[in-house]
């Protein structure tokens, strides 16, 4: 499709060889994550996210969606169990919402040591660790990391939802995201590099094309009630081919390819696949469409 045709919030698998996790987190936050801003904006506008919203962001990564919701007045909590490097960036981002507040995590996983009950919180751990018995239930749960990119990500998301929805109010919105039709996503041709190079490891996390009903099937298995959907143009634009390679690698979708071959081979094949999308001025541009599904907690 993280999204980027990614898991657009990268998996940052700890066992992936030859990966500088700090550099990957930086590439995600500085290059790749912004590609999903149109998706975040469309969802927040449709759901009228604002001062009355209590948002729980699953797989929050470096926190850009949380920051955008907080800027609209929402009380936000992000939870992620995978990448301390990304969460460190999220804490720094959200600390800027209240000038002068320390950027380090507090004893409850919050950003800084704020007294406000609605202060942004970043929690490293499973969704249930985001429970706050002193606050109202969450009114919005987001899973913006595009599902349907790997053979096993739907199952992983279903498990996250099963643990997160008990923290949400009845009727709360749950937002799932995924890639649009492959023929409307220029990045599909580039992501196929991951599938080609991971054939020997099929079933261990390699990329696959998104399917039409991926989001609906996850929602159904989680016992959620569908309540609308939409499509959003999310073009991937990069300053040059090198930036494009770094951004796409930061999604984690090519980890299995790196494990099956080597980093140099993956870089080479990615560079070749990006060539048709390179403009005369050296920039790289790939139009894409993402889907989102709004479901409700029964």
Image: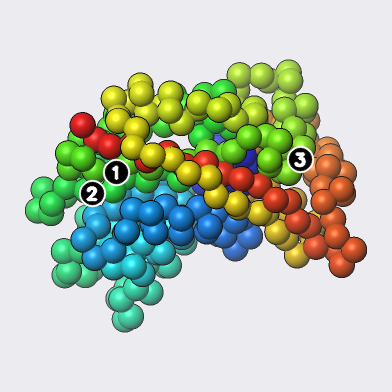
Which numbered dot is residue 190? Answer: 3
Measured from the top left, where is residue 52 in percent x and y?
21, 61
Is disc 1 surrounded by few (<14), some (14 to 19) or many (20+) residues within 10 Å?
A: many
Residue 86 visible in this rendered orientation of the protein: no
Q: Which residue is mark 2?
A: 139
Q: CA distance from mark 2 to mark 3?
A: 37 Å
Is disc 2 surrounded by few (<14), some (14 to 19) or many (20+) residues within 10 Å?
A: many
- Give me the residue at 34% from left, 68% from top: 72
Q: Earlier in the sequence, mark 1 or mark 2?
A: 2
Q: Earlier in the sequence, mark 1 or mark 3?
A: 1
- Give me the residue at 36% from left, 49% from top: 57
Does residue 201 sit above or below 15 in this rendering?
A: above
> Of all residues shown, which one is farthest toward the bottom?
100
Position of the C terminus by quadrant: top left
Label 2 vs label 3, nearer the camera: 2
> Of all residues shown, which one is farthest toward the left?
134
| C-beta proximity under 8 Å, tags 1 and 2 | yes
Does residue 291 sit above or below 96 in this rendering?
A: above
Would residue 210 appear left or right of 244 to someone viewing this image? Answer: left
Q: Secondary structure at mark 1?
A: strand
Q: CA distance from mark 1 to mark 2?
A: 6 Å
Q: Which residue is mark 1?
A: 173
Q: Secondary structure at mark 3?
A: helix
Is disc 3 surrounded by few (<14), some (14 to 19) or many (20+) residues within 10 Å?
A: many
């Amino acid at each position: 499709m993280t999204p980027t045709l990614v898991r657009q919030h990268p998996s940052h698998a700890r066992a992936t060889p030859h990966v500088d996790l700090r550099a990957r987190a930086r590439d995600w936050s500085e290059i790749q994550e912004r590609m999903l801003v149109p998706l975040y904006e469309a969802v927040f506008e449709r759901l009228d996210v604002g001062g009355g919203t209590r948002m729980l962001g699953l797989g929050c990564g470096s926190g850009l969606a949380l920051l955008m919701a907080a800027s609209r007045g929402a009380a936000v909590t992000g939870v992620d169990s995978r990448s301390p490097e990304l969460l460190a960036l999220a804490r720094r981002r959200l600390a800027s919402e209240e000038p002068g507040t320390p950027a380090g995590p507090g004893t409850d996983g919050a950003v800084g040591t704020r007294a406000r009950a609605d202060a942004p919180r970043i929690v490293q751990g499973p969704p249930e660790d985001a429970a706050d018995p002193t606050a109202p239930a969450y009114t919005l749960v987001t899973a913006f990391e595009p599902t349907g990119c790997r053979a096993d990500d739907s199952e992983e998301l279903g498990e996250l939802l099963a643990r997160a929805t008990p923290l949400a109010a009845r009727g709360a919105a749950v937002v799932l995201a995924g890639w649009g039709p492959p023929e409307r996503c220029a990045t599909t041709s580039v992501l196929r590099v991951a599938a080609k190079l991971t054939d020997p490891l099929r079933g261990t996390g390699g990329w696959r094309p998104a399917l039409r009903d991926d989001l609906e099937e996850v929602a159904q298995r989680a016992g959620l009630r569908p309540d609308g959907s939409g499509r959003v143009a999310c073009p991937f634009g990069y300053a040059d081919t090198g930036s494009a390679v770094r951004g796409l690698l930061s999604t984690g979708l090519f980890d299995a390819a790196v494990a099956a071959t080597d980093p140099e081979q993956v870089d080479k094949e990615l560079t070749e696949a990006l060539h048709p999308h390179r403009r005369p001025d050296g920039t790289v541009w790939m139009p894409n469409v993402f889907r989102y599904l709004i479901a409700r907690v029964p």
